[in-house]
Image (tube, rainbow, N blue to C red):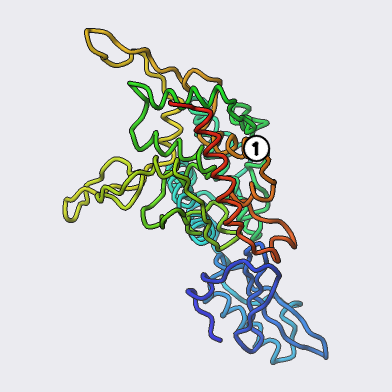
Amino acid sequence: MKFTDRYLQSIKPPEKEYCIREGHGFTLRVLPSGIKTFQYIYAMNGKRHRMNLGQYPATTLADAREKFRTAAIMVGKGMSPLEQPVATEPEAALTIQKLVDNYKVFVEQHLAKSTARETVRTVDKYIIPVWKERNAQEIRRKDAINLIDPIAATAPGQARGVMKIARAMFNYALDRELVEINPFTRLSTAVPSIKPTSTSRTLSDEEIKTVWDTIHSATPPGSAETRRALLLILITAQRPGEASGMAWSEIEKKWWTIPPERIKTRNHRQESHRVFLTPLAVRFIGNNPGYSEYVFPGPAIIDPVDQKAVFPPLHRKALSSMVCDERAGGRPAGEGKKTEAIAEYFGLPRWTPHDLRRTAATKLSELGCPDEIIDAILNHAKKGVIGIYNRNKYDKEKQEWLTKWAEHLEELIGSR
């Protein structure tokens, strides 16, 4: 077959290494890591040889073909291209701009849309303005520290996010032998403020009641859409980004089907995920008002072409902002009085929207739900041979245990 860029970009990481041949020894080697390497496979003096021509897309298809043709001519003359340098144009330095452009293509192919979108936004805002024309090979640890330090001084959480994305980009380059080191490895030892916070927080029964009461108070925090999305995480045990981006088209009767492109782990499995919607979940989803394709629409955006209002999905960060916001004054409640102020984290020890998902999983376990079913509800990938051969989606069990959890939750909150 004839290689094209469109075809090469469409190749997904396989479970096992394999090679694709165009012909006459011109070959593409594909690894489970996603690395794609051009090779020339030829025979000389009764022995088979394999010559690397460069990794795609850092080495373009056109450049690889030129290297292949030059090497093939040498083989035809009885000369080994592995022993003598192939006359090709020297490769230009890999600038940060080029690395970013290649990495954007990679994340858009292999990561969920929301993750890819956040990656693109972060590299464009924080990395390109500082290092655009720098040689990626020359970026060192001190450069990484100088990039992250100023951000961490005012926004440690944002700095942590920039560090994670930059580290992932350099891991991508390292895997493809485009750079020799990752300057962001273990960077938190040099910038302690970006060390990750604990991810083991679960809410107690009393804390669940507090969250529920605050959201249903006379002067609740956030928008109605934000509050409903937050509680849906607790009820369904799904990821905050998947809940906030829920579309009406994903709901059919009592089931919510999350498409693979919206799932965090879609680079591992090209499969949708089905979530049973209990009556309690349906209550917070509500009826389709018809003005947006999303269940929890965010603020309107005016389309520059037809000047009509468009309602995008609620941003996942809106949920976190609502939780950590502190309102110091309350709102008027009649007769000149004001309601009580809303404390940061609703007056509880620090918690995040994702902790609601962990809380639901923990409570399911306490109710007696088997770990395998909890993993199915959470959409955790099965590991090893089980993941390959056990294709059961556990829909019946999901319905049973999500119903039990919803009933337990309603009993817990009572008439709230």
Amino acid type assigned to the residue bearing label 1 in the image? Leu
Q: Is residue 337 above or below residue 375?
A: above
**Residue 21 percent location from the top left of the image:** 63, 83
Few, some or many C-alpha atoms within 10 Å of disc 1 (few <14, some 14-19, many ≥20)? few
User: What residue is at 63 percent from the left and 74 percent from the top?
Assistant: 38
**Residue 96 percent location from the top left of the image:** 51, 51
Side (left or right) of 409 relative to 129: right
Query: Could you say which quadrant of the image residue 213 lies in?
Result: top left
- The residue tagged 1 is 367
**Residue 24 percent location from the top left of the image:** 64, 89
SS under mark 1: loop
User: What residue is at 57 percent from the left and 59 percent from the top?
Assistant: 267
For the N terminus, the image quarter is bottom right
Side (left or right) of 21 relative to 384: left
Q: Residue furthest left?
A: 306
- The number of numbered discs placed on residues in the rendered structure image is 1
User: What residue is at 76 percent from the left and 88 percent from the top?
Assistant: 43
User: What residue is at 30 percent from the left and 49 percent from the top?
Assistant: 288
Side (left or right) of 300 relative to 262: left
Along the viewing direction, whichever of 113 and 128 lies nearer the viewer:
113
Q: Is residue 124 above or below residue 198?
A: below
Query: Could you say which quadrant of the image residue 26 lies in?
Result: bottom right
**Residue 343 percent location from the top left of the image:** 44, 17
Q: Is residue 297 above or below residue 2?
A: above
For the C terminus, the image quarter is top left
Query: Could you say which quadrant of the image residue 129 lies in?
Result: top left
